[in-house]
Image (cartoon, grey):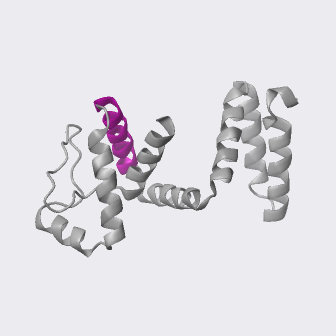
Amino acid sequence: MTRTFLALCLAVLAAIIVIPPAGAAAPENPAGLAPAVSGEDAGLRWQQLPAGERDRLQELYHRYQELPAEQKDVLQDRLRYFRQLPEEEQLRLRERFRVWQSLSPSEKERIRNTYRHYQELSPAKQMELREEMHKAHDMAPADRMMRHQELRHEFMMPRGGR
């Protein structure tokens, strides 16, 4: 359920706008979010979307409607946060999401495991790792990749492997 909810959160944030399908009732808006597109423009834009995108958005819309109120609140908070970000940051996040979507399931799982191990580190070790990663940022791409691998082995080995 958590993975499904996370996937739904990411999909909603990626879409930014969930245009209800033609003939569907507009979603409730308890968070007071201003619609990005409304009225006649929404219907026109909906019809201009490729059929596959309309089907995907319709599926997301129905999944959203089935969520418990608490999860809807979380999604609305995340959307509200995203909308207040500067445009450059929104573009950066959209690009990172696009890259995430292109990863294989095994790559995604490796990243999730790395993140779990990172969360197990002490705050001091987390800070040290962030500083080392920041230093590596200015290296040539091949050197940076090698340094990142070294840091992963140094900091991120599962507790049983240290």
Q: Is residue 75 magenta?
A: yes
Report whether 51 appears left or right of 120. left
Q: Quadrant of the C terminus?
A: top right
Q: Is residue 65 magenta?
A: no
Q: Is residue 152 above or below residue 107?
A: above
**Which image quadrant for residue 113?**
top right
Report whether 74 appears left or right of 156. left
**Which image quadrant for residue 160?**
top right
Mostly what secondary structure, the magenta segment?
Answer: helix
Q: Kindly identify the residue that appears in the image at 19 percent across and 42 percent down.
A: 29
Residue 9 x, y percent position in the rendering: 42, 45
Q: Is residue 70 above or below residue 143?
A: above
Residue 39 x, y percent position in the rendering: 11, 62
Residue 86 x, y percent position in the rendering: 42, 54
Q: Is residue 85 above or below residue 72?
A: below
Of residues 128 and 161, the one drawn nearer to the viewer in this rendering: 161
Residue 128 x, y percent position in the rendering: 77, 34
Q: Which residues are magenta?
A: 69-84
Residue 5 can be seen in this image = yes
Residue found at the far top of this picture: 122
Q: Is residue 92 above or below residue 50?
A: above
